[in-house]
Amino acid sequence: MPDSQPRRPDDNAPDSADAATTADHPALVLGGARLADGRAVDVRVSGSRIEAVGTAGSLTARGPRVDLRGYLLLPAPAEPHAHSDTALTADSAGPGPASHRAEDIQRRATEAALLQLGHGATALRTHVRVGDVQGLAPLEAVLQTRRALRGIADVMPVAVPRLLTGVAGADSLAMLRDAVGMGAAVVGGCPDLDPDPTGYTEAVLEIAAEHGCPVDLHTDGDDPARLARLAAMAAGLRPGVTLGPCGGLAHLPLEAATRAADQLAAAGIAVVCLPQGGCAGAERRTTAPVRLLRSAGVRVAAGSGAVRDTANPVGRGDPLEAAYLLASQAGLRAEQAYASVSTAARAALGLPCVRVEAGFPAELLAVRGERLSAALSLGYSRIVIHGGRIVARTSAVREYCDSDADAIAGLGGLPRQGRPDSGAGPRN
């Protein structure tokens, strides 16, 4: 969140904005990387920021040099809509439901965050249920994950109560305030599940205004009147309001959906869609009408939603897959699709903008490929940079056995992805 906003405990400060966590790392040069505009460049990183960008081979290294020839260098993705407290529970051992002990939630949340970091997401906003029988234990477990991953990835929990109105919601309302005091970075919730959705939204917005927190509400978006009221209440709230996954918008008549999109745009509300599938509490698995929302001026980000829980037992948590689906199914250009998981996602999370230019935060993803379309299609090998240092690597090698390697190599120009020193046949 911007420094001008009131702050709660220091645990909420994104590590990528804290140069002290990386100031003792030597300068790093990323050599020969290709940018999305086609240029081959060297990038020198110092501390947590990009110090210089020059033509390939032009920058000297005061520290390690990483050869990124054959890689595309991009602003790192961010994950704007995760559910870490329920992640990795689809295949839990035993006949009963998955364990909700704090240590088990922390273990799963940490594993899921590392999985998504390996895909490239250096920042992650995760919705965490508070109230009911578990109380604040799931939030405390995710806050422990946040502390454990400090300097590796930014984890921003969203406190999500089930009810907030009437007698039944009184305890949850008090617990939501406690959650903010504990360190929840965002005030959230599911107004669709409360008997009084408007009252629920008012309560969330009031607490967020008191503490200077962002708001992130989970809604299907299939009720135009409810969306209009929400837009009217949230207009101008700083540091901002986000809605998701809004799959119900795609089922409204075109006129009603267009009017709702215009109202969201006028209120400055961002929408996070989930191209990879639904998540807990989502009524529909349909993706929000991305092109309609973008045409109205709504900032649209894309998230992963469920990661291998009952809502999506095969959820990958891969932002490049979300971008691939937006390009292949929603009709976005590759550049627009990738921006939805990087630039737009970071903006929805209140994080600084990232460009591969001097002075910007060193939050970067190097993915094997010469063009963005190829990277979204087949970008398995990845190098993730957070706070100015490499925090994750994934290397994929594909080998074709029992083939005439010399004849295939002689064709030239075939895609190759793997170890340059390997004597095996063609790779991809």
Image (spheres, rainbow, N blue to C red):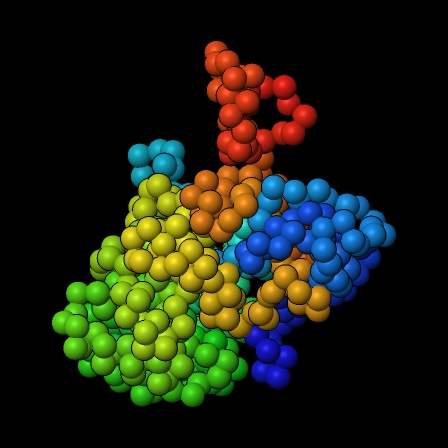
Residue 83 in the figure: left or right of residue 424: left
In the rendered image of this protein, does residue 306 appear above or below residue 248? above
Residue 257 horizontal side relative to residue 428, left or right: left
Q: Whole-percent x and y of residue 30? A: 71, 50
Q: Position of residue 277 (x, y in %)?
A: 31, 51
Residue extending farthest right: 62
Q: Nearer the viewer, residue 95 or 112?
A: 112
Q: Nearer the viewer, residue 412 or 226?
A: 412
* Residue closest to the eye, 200 or 70: 70
Dividing the picture into quadrants, the one containing residue 88 is top left
Quarter-of-image position of residue 71: top right
Specify the quadrant of the image occupied by residue 336. Answer: bottom left
| Residue 202 visible in rendering | no
Quick check: can you spot residue 353?
A: yes
- Judging depth in this view, the residue of 9 and 369 nearest the camera is 369
101 horizontally vs 419: left or right: left
Above or below for 346 versus 44: below
Residue sitting at 66 percent across and 44 percent down? 68
